[in-house]
Image (cartoon, rainbow, N blue to C red):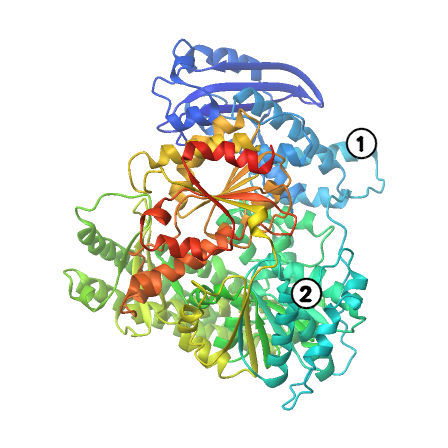
Amino acid sequence: MTSIVSIDIETTGLDENREAIIEIAAVKFNGRRVEDEFSTLINPGKAIPEFITGLTGIDNAMVRQAPRLIDIKQELLDFVGDAPILGHNVKFDIGFLRKAGLFPYHQTIDTYELASVLMPTASRYNLGSLGQQLNIPLPATHRALDDARVTQAAYVRLLDIAKELPLETLQEIVELSNFVDWDAGWAFEQALQARAKEGIKSKSTKSTSVPAPKPVSTKNDSSPIENNEKPIPLDPEEIASVLEYGGPFSQYFESYEHRPEQVDMLKAVANALSNGNHLLVEAGTGVGKSFAYLVPAAIFAVRNNTRVVVSTNTINLQDQLIKKDIPDLQAALSLDVRAAVLKGRSNYLCPRRLQFMRQHGPKDANEMRVLAKLIVWKLENDSGDRNELNLTGPIEREVWSRLSAEDDNCTTETCLGRMSGTCPFHRAKQAALGSHLLIVNHALLLSDVSTGSKVLPEYDYVIVDEAHHMENAVTSALSFRMTQNDLERMLKELGGSSAGLLGRLLTETHDALRPSDFGLLQQKAKHATDQAFRLEQITREFFNVLGDFISIQREGQPSSNYSWQLRIVPASRTLPGWDNVEIMWDQISETMGLLLKTLEEIYRALGDVYAEGHENVQDVMGNLGSLMRRMAEAEAASSGMMSKPSNDLIYWVEVNPRGERLSLNAAPLRVGPLVQEHLWHKKACVIMASATLTTHGEFRYLRNTLSADEVNTLALGSPFDYESSTLLYVANDMPEPNAQGYQQALDRAIISTAKATGGRMLVLFTSYAALKKTAQAITGPLGREDIFVFEQGEGASPNALLESFKSTERAVLLGTRSFWEGVDVPGDSLSVVVITKLPFGVPSDPIIAARSELYEDSFNEYYLPESILKFRQGFGRLIRSASDRGVVAILDRRVLTKQYGRLFLESLPQCTARQGATAGLAKMAGDWLGV
């Protein structure tokens, strides 16, 4: 076997052109045997930033007498020899080393690439998490030798997993990797060679997945679902008996608890469905709202052979409903209710498009990684649902978009004809058509209502869970964003006579058309190529002119870590330079209109070819149709912003923090009228439920936001005893959030409290920049106490982060945005929630600024209610079951010093409340938790 050298470096920063190495380590190994190790600190010739010292434990004093990189260069070259170099995200390590003139031609291997393919559903791929998931008993500490050892051990484990793949899978991955330069290709070749030496024998793939849940009934052999104008009403008392002691639920569920609040909600839902009323219902944590609406909805749907749509905001709740709650309900009630989940087309893998990429090969290493990941994933997963796969970052998601079922040209007929019903989206749609209960997310629900019911099967009854998200969901569904990259990517996708879609369609039609007809098509493709080239040139000019306009507006303003936004209001259109922006956009609009006209002619010509039986053009037709739609939508939305503004939309231009990417944006000003038109007025019964719909005990704010003036309301408290279970600690000596010393006081409080409680902590931030500062300050100190810090950011999905946090005994999770809600960690894994700052919206945000103008007293009528709702959500992360016990710490003393502060505290359930010094939090938390 070949010796391999695992290398890891620590540096003063991420940029190889400006930063320097402070430590290098290497581990030489052959198979499972470690042959030698090399490790040294390096004098970088510059100061080590404080956060790097916090992360690694390496400070300036430690490297002062250390050798410079040039001094150990030869020793390192001799140690490595001509062995392949292994690293985790090896391009980072090898980038710094090659910058120093080392290892310019060595074979490189990346454990990140290998793990991404071989563990397609893993929660995270960073080195520490990978070590845990592979049961490697070594710590990844951000010290070079420790990390090089973990990387070596990870490679050995991953190679074992690769050798367990079916031989034909290994062969396919190796053959496909020959198309590109890929840092996992060499390792798969080694695995294939090892398998070939063993001879051909059957190998079972090892599954680390959770056993499949009880299948939900989706059979379609019953009578078709109908919409009844006069449904058979439910008797609320009869339905409520399901929840009584001695009833079906108490017999089915072990340690069943009867909750009066759950019964009240169930009766209200039964009445609303029976009488065709709308309902807003707030049900505190622990009420069991899922069953409170599922039981009456299921019985009502079965008795009337009708459909009830249940809409959720999160995938977690969808999974809980379809994999756990509904199967339990079917079993407990012996009820033949058919249920299905339907997601948007882009969530499903298209087997036809995957087959095409497997046949034609990947075009770069990113495409290769995703393709190999899907090939391995499909060995044990036939759902085709992207949410069961870890797609990391925008690049992998962009590759997925080219393989998803989001194909405008794919109809049920062509799908059945080409793929014989194996398409995951087709299967999901068929199940939806026969379902009594159809589970969707808010985005799909809104996509359906905004397209005139073209997405979902017909329904008259809808239950919206996690309804506090409704305003944001409507805003997202109807928002628009376009960057220069988006336009250029569409033009690159279109290509020209020898590349992209235009090149492909000429290849596909060459043998199908008469020479004269093919010549005409070639002419049209050449015409489209010329128009696209002109459009690309004008697009660059437009964004340069827009950039100049923005620079004038930003003049004299300090740089920031946040995106800079300029709301486009009538006054903006009179500013110097805006005329030039409009003139340039008019040129884009005109050229894009001409290009779309040419593409329409090409599309019609392809349709004629397809009609003559040449099915090979179907793929390219679908892709061209999708591209034309996206281009037309981009042109219409941007033209609205530039020259035909609507009073119902908010417009703004955004510049990213580094100032090199501009985007055009639009969003609806009011969501209430849209919800009113498409839901309150059109559906027989709409029920909206959440744990947080009221502010200071009233529904007024939500009624106003969602135009729910005539809707019935019901507010139910929580059955949990918060006074016994929850310590609410308010630090009364913290500097205010923007005052000097706040950040240091915050970091000290988190470190000391995490040490006292052994981690088990969720820290909630209102901005990613603040989260990052704390992460840099606490990761090193807590790491030395064996407390792992998970931070939200680029890379792992929030769900994957949460799973990692749950499975790590001593951990702190830093979260923003999505972590204020939807986090469900019952038991001892989460015992402390820290709220670092009251979650007020940013007044300069264009959407917040525009909507605040709708109110006479914007602070009290808009900012404050929004913030209280989010604050209540954050508080609700702690106590998730009756046996939970924990601490909520508020490190923003404005709840004590500002007049509005009491409204936040009064919006919470009655807890054991204490005020005290920040330094006293750690001891009090430890005492409360008994640790």
Q: Which disc is residue 84 wearing? A: none
- Residue 665 in view, yes or no: no
Q: Quadrant of residue 689?
A: bottom right
Secondary structure, mark 1, is helix
* 149 up-or-down from 292: above or below: above
The residue tagged 1 is: 197
> Looking at numbered disc 1 in the image, what kind of residue is underneath it?
Lys
Work out which residue is located at the far right of the displayed protein and give it. 201
* 768 up-or-down from 309: above or below: above
Left or right: residue 526 compared with residue 805: left
Left or right: residue 49 compared with residue 511: left
> Looking at numbered disc 2 in the image, what kind of residue is underneath it?
Cys
Residue sitting at x 39%, y 74%: 597
- Mark 2–mark 1 Cα distance, whole angstroms, equals 37 Å
The residue tagged 2 is: 423
Q: Quadrant of residue 524?
A: bottom left
| Of residues 459 and 630, the one drawn nearer to the viewer in this rendering | 459
Which dot, 2 or 1, sits closer to the camera? 2
Residue 507, image x, y percentages: 54, 62
Left or right: residue 924 compared with residue 930: left
- Residue 599 in view, yes or no: yes
